[in-house]
Amino acid sequence: MAEENKTVVSKESLWYVDNYIVLLDYYDRTISRIAARCVRQGNIALEEYKFYPYILDVLEEICDTGNYILEHKELYPYVEKRVAGGIEALKKNLSLYQEELTNNQSPDMLRADPDEAKKLNEVMSNFDKSVDPTVGAGMNIDELMEKLMAENNISNKEQTE
């Protein structure tokens, strides 16, 4: 009788799988709730919501938990049973969450990661500095339309025809 090769998984490690699943559901519900609050607050962007950093905190915890799972291959069989799509879906979704977190990090978070700050500097330094991106801010709709028409060589006469 061959002895099976089984790895013992602790309750603490299994907690990460359960926590990951709970966090995903919580994140989805939190985004829905905050989106509704943004609509009620004048249809503001999600990023403008005063408690938006909390979403990033949840994302960070999802990423930390997911990374723990990926580092502990003994948890993979449990992931296959508990996560729709199994470990491949976890990897794909975790990659998306990590990208979302990275793309929305605050300046304070970036300061803690010098590589991210360097990447941000490179991206920001590639903008065309000959054009002021704030030109037009605060224009009324008529002024904005005139500006856009002028930039695209459209005369007011063509607009009315």
Image (cartoon, rainbow, N blue to C red):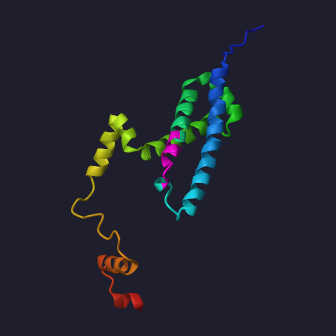
Closer to the camera, 50 or 83?
A: 50
Which quadrant: the C terminus? bottom left
Work out whether residue 95 can be spotted.
no
Seen from this angle, which residue lies furthest left?
130
Report the residue at 67% width, 15% height from top: 8
Residue 136: image quadrant is bottom left
Provide residue 160's location: percent of width, then percent of height: 41, 91
- Where residue 115 appears, as percent x and y from the top left, is 33, 36
Q: Is residue 22 above or below residue 16?
A: below
Residue 122 visible in the displayed image: yes
- Identify the image quadrant of the N terminus: top right
Dominant SS of magenta comes to: helix
User: Which residue sits at x=68%, y=40%?
Assistant: 84
Left or right: 107, with 83 as reference point: left
Q: Which of these two is toward me, 85 or 142?
A: 142
How many labels, in total?
A: 0
Q: Residue, x 34% and y 76% (percent of image)?
A: 148
Verify whether residue 1 appears in magenta.
Answer: no
**Residue 154 in which image quadrant:** bottom left
The residue range painted magenta reads: 49-57
Q: Is residue 10 above or below residue 36?
A: above
Q: Position of residue 24 (x, y in %)?
A: 62, 41
Left or right: 99 in relation to 9: left
